[in-house]
Image (tube, grey):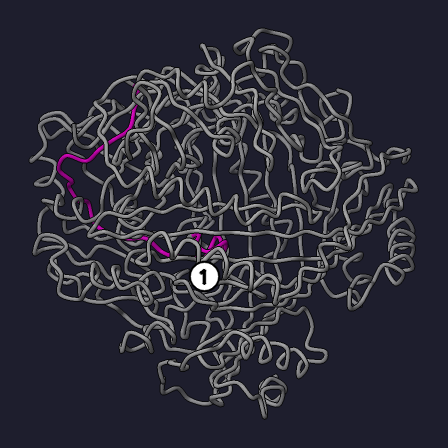
């Protein structure tokens, strides 16, 4: 990095915590992050942007007289002033359900910084994007092609009044490729991406090129499906979206407040025995990993759903104190990852077993559904008709709908092979309603 | 500030460069259930240098004004790496020095935090206790005061203050595994009173959340649908507005052909407008984030495609005039082409005449959200009702419309005369910049054969 603030922050952190404590705070925490990044972007098949960025930010949280005050900023010299603001804010602030942070413990040593990432020069990223763009152009030179790449390096630190004092360095990269194919009023959008904290085999231009070629090949033919109820075949990227109601439903704070539909389901067979979900925040170089949560509680791999049985709710420290539960080391009471465990058959064999169904690549409007209740109703923005185990063409203007929490009780299946990026399997979910504009 | 920014741009080797520097001061708090659940405040500064050289762009994002000249140099060097063609940015005639201080009718900064917390707490009590069956709540207040300074190598400078306040009222009702929400939101750029006297709305969201527990899902299929004005506004924004943003068009020959001015888009009484200069709404500014004055732009006039929304670059490359629609969500983000206050203009029918034309249909109310993939769109109503013989009857939940914009606009067969503009919470999301404050508006409109998703 061109500049580092970590040493400077150590002194500031000590002063901030001492100042907050002196003003009556029973607990205080400061967190800080600083990052630098380089990126390039292609639009319409041509290099268009080269960007650089440097930014920092910090947060000060205090608890005073049972209430918390949180103040954020990005000017280090204003940190002392922000302490005053946090203290002042605590007078009316949110109710805190603890008065002191827990004592820090030992934490797993996770790898998050790779010098190899820093070998990604702007020239290299431009060259790699150009290679992907040239390949896609060779498939169809009428496409509107976009590509981008970026790399970043960051440092972070956190300290609290219980003695937590940790620093971390992190690198990351991202690679993106997308196309828009326009034929009259008919449009196809396809994109793929990769990102990781280490420069390893996941930085794979060919993987992105193949993903785009797949959609161009299969969307070249159109297909229709009549209104009805069908199985859907989900690639690993889509499966994560369908786990959202579980992720929301196991939030311990929502469970305590009574707004989770899974509130009364702990220990019960909520889903198909085919479904096992593990939260693993201990994967080196994963963007989702963390050694400890916002209160300094150590994280650990946890089974969330075991063969369809709901095993746990998740609690950050404040929520655990509120609900008189054991903290699980989850900031915001949300999972870090939701790895669905693999099944028996390959993704290809599963696809071949479907007599008639929809292969869902992209959804439009999924997030507007009442996902907290498990309901979804959205446009299958990029979907293919599967007939007799083969993809036969693109289906447009189809809405799919159902209740995910109910659908996951059904005869669902997951593939034995996992996506190298997100480590999720393919899935088949039967029983999804399909309504189309034209039959 | 003006001289500091202009000095940093002096002798810049790019064809064009600009610096936007911002300060923001924000405060927000929310009740969830019985307790004040989170409360935070923040002060941030930062900005971005953008430079254009031979048609290529470079940018440098920063937090402080220290070493500003070197940040300009970084952006210029990056632009030089990229540029391989001719820079084509539209010219605009603007005064060299413009200062737009916020014209607040009732300044939220003059109201104490204690008063605001008490107000929100009162609403929260109503949401939780108005009717049996409400399990929890989210009642949130937020305020933000953004000050934007801008200078470019064209010698122009502006400072504009852009305040915003908003209030969310959400009731959450649960019956076993069934969870439903009732929600309303309110926002203003000028007037704190927008969050006052909302007791009736707090009661209404509670009643609706409980009622939705018993409401059936909207049946999937093709329906005649009447959109309430707030939903019409989302329709105008999602189904058509994004398609008129010229950054989706200017370098894509097929899209330019598809969106050629003069194309018949709908029936003759359809008019869709974007107006960033309208009143003092949350989507209104004096100038956009490239210094272009905002304006009223007819997107569809009498059913015919009449205009696009432009930045300096899209206008320059399409031979059009900039429309003042280059907007950035905040410090460190580049401006991209965005809508401002977008609405379907009033028609001639009365609301009653519109409903009288529907024997069996759906009345879609309240904005849940929307999304577009250019020709394809979805938008979700917070709730709705069945229409039978022109009368509003049973409450329905889960109403999600979808369609192809080029077909759907032709299916608008009735436009009422009750145009209303809505300043709500949330905003528009595009290019990772969300939520940008925008206003939605329109009258009641009637759609024939709209596709609604639902379970079979």
Query: B44 or A403, which is in the foreground?
Result: A403
Residue range in magenta is B429-455
Q: Position of residue A405 (x, y in %)?
A: 48, 18
Q: Position of residue B63 (x, y in %)?
A: 68, 68
> Is residue B23 shown above or below B178?
below
Identified at 37% across, 41% down, the residue is A215
**Taking the image as drawn, is residue B295 in sight?**
yes
**Taking the image as drawn, is residue B129 in sight?**
no
Query: A373 or B203, which is in the foreground?
Result: A373
Identified at 62% across, 16% down, the residue is A305
Q: Quadrant of the C terminus of chain B?
A: top left
> Is residue A356 shown above or below A62?
above
Subunit under mark 1: B
Give the secondary structure at mark 1. Answer: loop
In the image, is B231 to the left or to the right of B287?
left
Q: Per the image, is B445 magenta?
A: yes
Query: B102 or B83, which is in the foreground?
Result: B83
Identified at 60% across, 35% down, the residue is A420
For residue A418, which quarter of the picture? top right
Q: Quadrant of the N terminus of chain B?
A: bottom right
Q: Per the image, is B357 magenta?
A: no
From the image, tell me which residue sits under label 1. B189
Q: Position of residue A370 (x, y in %)?
A: 43, 29
For residue B46, which quarter of the picture? bottom right
> Is residue A386 shown above or below B167?
above
> Is residue B119 shown above or below A223?
below
For residue B205, which quarter of the picture? top left
In the image, is B92 to the left or to the right of A19?
left
């Amino acid at each position: 990095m061109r500049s580092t603030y970590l040493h400077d922050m150590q002194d500031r952190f000590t002063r901030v915590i001492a100042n907050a404590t002196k003003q009556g705070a029973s607990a205080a925490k400061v967190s800080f992050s600083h990052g630098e990044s380089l990126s390039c972007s292609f639009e319409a098949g041509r290099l268009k942007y080269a960007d650089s960025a440097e930014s920092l930010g910090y947060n000060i949280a205090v608890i005073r007289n049972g209430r918390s005050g949180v103040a954020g900023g990005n000017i280090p010299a204003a940190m002392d002033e922000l302490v005053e603001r946090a203290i002042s804010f605590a007078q009316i602030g949110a109710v805190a359900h603890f008065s002191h942070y827990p004592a820090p413990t030992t934490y797993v040593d996770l790898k998050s910084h790779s010098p190899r990432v820093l070998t990604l020069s702007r020239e290299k990223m431009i060259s790699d994007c150009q290679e992907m763009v040239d390949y896609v152009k060779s498939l169809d030179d009428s496409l509107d092609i976009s590509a981008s790449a970026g790399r970043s390096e960051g440092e972070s630190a956190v300290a609290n009044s219980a003695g937590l004092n940790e620093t971390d360095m992190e690198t990351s990269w991202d690679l993106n490729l997308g196309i828009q194919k326009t034929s009259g009023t008919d449009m196809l959008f396809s994109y793929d991406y990769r990102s990781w904290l280490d420069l390893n085999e996941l930085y794979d231009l060919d993987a992105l090129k193949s993903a785009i070629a797949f959609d161009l090949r299969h969307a070249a033919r159109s297909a229709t499906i009549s209104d009805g109820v069908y199985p859907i075949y989900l690639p690993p990227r889509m499966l994560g979206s369908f786990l959202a109601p579980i992720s929301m439903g196991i939030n311990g704070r929502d469970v305590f407040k009574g707004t989770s539909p899974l509130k009364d389901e702990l220990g019960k067979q909520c889903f198909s025995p085919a479904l096992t979900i593990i939260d693993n925040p201990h994967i080196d170089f994963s963007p989702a990993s963390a050694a400890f949560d916002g209160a300094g509680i150590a994280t650990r791999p946890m089974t969330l759903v075991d063969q369809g049985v709901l095993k746990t709710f998740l609690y950050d420290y404040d929520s655990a104190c509120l609900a008189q539960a054991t903290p699980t080391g989850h900031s915001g009471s949300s999972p870090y990852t939701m790895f669905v465990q693999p099944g028996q058959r390959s993704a290809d064999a599963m696809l071949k077993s479907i007599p008639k169904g929809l292969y869902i690549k992209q959804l439009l409007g999924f997030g507007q559904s009442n996902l907290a209740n498990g309901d979804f109703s959205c446009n299958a923005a990029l979907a293919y008709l599967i007939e007799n185990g083969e993809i036969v063409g693109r289906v447009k203007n189809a809405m799919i709908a159902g209740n995910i929490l109910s659908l996951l009780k059904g005869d669902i299946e997951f593939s034995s092979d996992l996506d190298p990026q997100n480590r999720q399997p393919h899935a088949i979910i039967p029983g999804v309603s399909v309504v189309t504009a034209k039959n | 500030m003006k001289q500091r920014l202009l000095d940093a741009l002096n002798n810049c080797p790019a064809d064009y460069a600009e610096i936007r520097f911002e300060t923001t001061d924000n405060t927000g708090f929310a009740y969830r259930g019985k307790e004040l659940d989170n409360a935070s405040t923040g002060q941030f500064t930062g900005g971005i240098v953008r430079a254009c050289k031979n048609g290529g762009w470079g940018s440098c994002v920063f937090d402080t004004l220290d070493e500003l000249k070197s940040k300009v140099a970084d952006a210029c060097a990056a632009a030089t790496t990229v540029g391989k063609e001719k820079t084509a940015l539209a010219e605009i005639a603007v005064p060299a020095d413009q200062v737009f201080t916020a014209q607040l009718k009732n300044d939220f900064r003059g109201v104490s935090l204690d008063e605001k917390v008490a107000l929100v707490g009162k609403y929260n009590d109503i949401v939780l206790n108005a009717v049996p069956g409400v399990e929890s709540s989210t009642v949130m207040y937020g305020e933000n005061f953004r000050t934007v300074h801008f200078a470019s190598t064209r010698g122009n400078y502006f400072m504009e203050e852009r305040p915003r306040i908003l209030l969310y009222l959400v009731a959450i009702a649960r019956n076993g595994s069934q969870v439903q929400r009732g929600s309303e939101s309110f926002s203003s750029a000028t007037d704190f009173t927008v969050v006052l006297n909302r007791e009736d709305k707090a009661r209404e969201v509670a009643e609706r959340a409980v009622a939705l527990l018993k409401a059936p899902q909207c049946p999937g299929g093709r329906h005649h649908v009447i959109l309430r004005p707030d939903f019409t506004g989302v329709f105008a924004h999602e189904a058509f507005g994004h398609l008129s943003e010229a950054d989706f068009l200017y370098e894509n020959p097929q899209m330019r052909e598809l969106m050629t001015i003069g194309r018949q888009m709908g029936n003759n009484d359809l008019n869709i407008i974007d107006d960033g200069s309208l009143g003092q709404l949350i989507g209104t500014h004096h100038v956009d984030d490239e210094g272009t004055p905002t304006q009223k732009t007819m997107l569809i006039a009498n059913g015919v495609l009449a205009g696009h929304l432009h930045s300096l670059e899209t206008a320059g490359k399409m031979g059009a005039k900039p429309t003042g629609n280059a907007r950035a969500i905040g410090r460190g983000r580049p401006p991209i082409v965005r809508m401002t206050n977008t609405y379907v203009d009033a028609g001639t029918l009365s609301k009653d005449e519109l409903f009288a034309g529907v024997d069996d249909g759906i009345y879609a109310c309240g904005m849940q959200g929307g999304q577009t993939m250019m020709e394809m769109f979805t938008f979700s109503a917070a709730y709705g009702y069945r229409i039978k013989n022109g009368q509003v009857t049973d409450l329905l939940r889960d109403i999600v419309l979808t369609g192809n914009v080029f077909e759907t606009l032709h299916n608008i067969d009735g436009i009422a005369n009750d145009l209303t503009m809505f300043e709500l919470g949330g905003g528009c999301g595009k290019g990772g910049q969300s939520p940008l404050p925008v206003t939605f508006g329109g009258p009641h409109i009637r759609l024939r054969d709209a596709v609604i998703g639902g379970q079979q």
